[in-house]
Amino acid sequence: MLGLLFILFAGMAVGCAISMVAQRNPLYSAISLIGVFISLACLYVTLAAPFIAAVQVIVYAGAIMVLVVFVIMLLNVEEEERGPMRLRSLVPIAVGLATVLFAETVFIIRFVATSPATPVANISDIGQTASIGAGLFTTYLLPFEVTSILLLMAVVGAITLARRGGLIAAKVAVVPGHASYARETLNPAAYPDLTEVNADNSREAAALLGVADGTPPRDHE
Amino acid sequence: MEDLRHLILLMIGILVAFTVVMTLVAYTVLAERRVLGFIQGRLGPNRVGPGGALQPLADLLKFIFKEDIVPDKSTRFVYFLAPMIATTAALMTIVVYPFGPDIHLPFTLPFANTNTIPMVIAKFDVALLYVLGVTSVGVYGIALAGWSSNNKYSLMGGLRSAAQMISYELALGLGLIGVILQSGTLNLQGIVEQQSGHLGITGWNMFWVQPLGFFVYLTAAIAETNRVPFDLPEAETELVAGFHTEYSAMKFALFFLAEYVNMFTVSMLATTLFLGGWNGPFVHQLPWLGPFYFLGKVVMFLFFYIWLRGTLPRFRFDQLMTFGWQFLVPLAIINIVVTATIQWSGLFDYVAKFLKTGIGWGG
């Protein structure tokens, strides 16, 4: 029974993974990747690790991939054109690495098949929510907290990057005469005496040059 | 042989739960139309059968016989896949809810080798996480439907839905952590059993320990099911019908079904976690009352949903985002901190001694 389920879900995982690489449409690739995650979660359940399975579905299939699909939908990414292959020189290296990977797999399978089965102490606890929680908050407390700080840094960094020049697409604000405007909004031919400054938005540019701000104030800045 | 017997029993259990839930869902649709009619001072459908009782059947027949239209430039495969994902994800969570305590039926002894019938299909240690995971996959149904229809209204509906569900999932999950902290288990049957108190009422999580968590969960859950006042993905005044604009016949019926099944499962989770599940007066003497209490509470929730729909206007999209991120999420975090502090200080055990276990007031 378990063997049958393993073949089913492992086959699904491998099939979805191949489809993910082979698809030309980015959305199909994303859907295939979701399929991989869900089949992996099913495999975790058959390995008596329900907590990992649930977290796999919630975090990867339910949150990260929703964002990926969201971005693909938002940008309306077109199907990838099959053009001439770039980086042709990397092909031999790829073949070599694939051979190493394959050899590794064969070695591991042989090793697992020939090694004697060693029972693990208190095997019934492993994979249960309580033991994972206890481990995270006692033995592995430091790595756990360091990871959370790392994630916090990523969030802060993303927000900082998103706020820079996010109002109008003006990396450079242009100041003709006494007011500053975004360069995109002006016809350069009409203003021969343009002054360019490096600023995130036109208000900042105006402050740098000491002139009035030409754009109406935005209340959501 | 034992495996086969187990499998057959499982199938029977799923069939019974499925039938009960689907029947109630069908009548929720009718109830919604009748109650909305009552709120708005009109009658609602009352012609098919006595008092409109056969209306769901007539609607189903209509959906089956409608012409099935597929837009010319839609992305075929995804267009067909989307309603399947939505419905499957909605229905999959039914198996983990405890409908009642174990019931003893003597006549099942020859077939099932036991006379104890558990009122939950899958006893799952991480049932709560399973529910959250399956619910979070359901968003693909709506998002992909919006994308594959090749229609700008559909796309806007799908995008809104994806953004809304990502935002409110966070508040939903954080709102539930209080209950988990306080009960110390993710097993739904265990959480229900902890809520038995005097007459099966005083122990409900909603009253004593998690009123804030209940509010956060309820609000986020309404947003997750795309219902008024959070029904931006299908706002008919702006988006025709939102993500399902291009869907007709049975494929539309599947989305319709998914929405109502989602309402139902959300109500079941709220009942299980906050309203004591199948607990009620005399349920320990007469276990048969359990399922009735449980479904009764769920029906109360559904009525609340319909009541909201008849009462509240729709949010604006920026209001929706502000409300979710700047009000609900901080509130949920406050709830977690307060619950953890109380739990750590042992104050809760002191209260529980009087209210939850039945010691104290001569119980």
Image (cartoon, coloured by chain):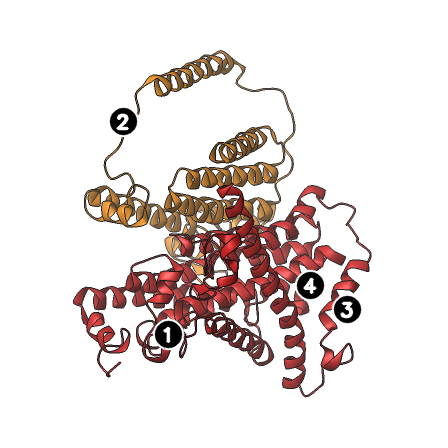
Chain colours: A orange, B red
Q: Nearer the viewer, mark 4 or mark 2?
A: 2
Instruction: Indicate which disc, 3 or 1, sits on the residue closer to the N terminus.
Output: 3
For label 4, the residue is: B241
In the image, A119: left or right of A160? left
Tell me: residue A72, above or below residue B90.
Answer: above
Q: Quick check: can you spot residue B295? A: yes
Gap in angstroms between the C-alphas marked 4 and 3: 22 Å
Tell me: residue B340, above or below residue B33.
Answer: above
* Residue under the image location 57 percent in, 45 percent down: A188
Gap in angstroms between the C-alphas marked 4 and 2: 60 Å
Report x, y in % for residue B222: 51, 68
Q: Which mark is residue B58?
A: 3
Q: Which quarter of the picture shows residue B299?
A: bottom right
Mark 3 nearby-residue class (10 Å; few <14, some 14–19, many ≥20): some
Tell me: residue B278, above or below residue B139.
Answer: below
CB under 8 Å between callouts 2 and 3?
Answer: no
For label 2, the residue is: A118
Query: Disc 1 sits on a residue from what chain?
Result: B
User: Which residue is nearer to you in this view: B12 or B166?
Assistant: B12
Q: Nearer the viewer, mark 1 or mark 4?
A: 1
Q: Quadrant of the C terminus of chain A?
A: bottom left
Instruction: Indicate which disc, 4 or 3, sits on the residue closer to the N terminus.
Output: 3
Report x, y in % for residue A36: 51, 36
* Residue under the image location 36 percent in, 74 percent down: B204
Q: Amino acid at mark 1?
A: Met
Mark 1 nearby-residue class (10 Å; few <14, some 14–19, many ≥20): many
For label 1, the residue is: B206
Q: Secondary structure at mark 3?
A: helix
In the image, A141: left or right of B139? left
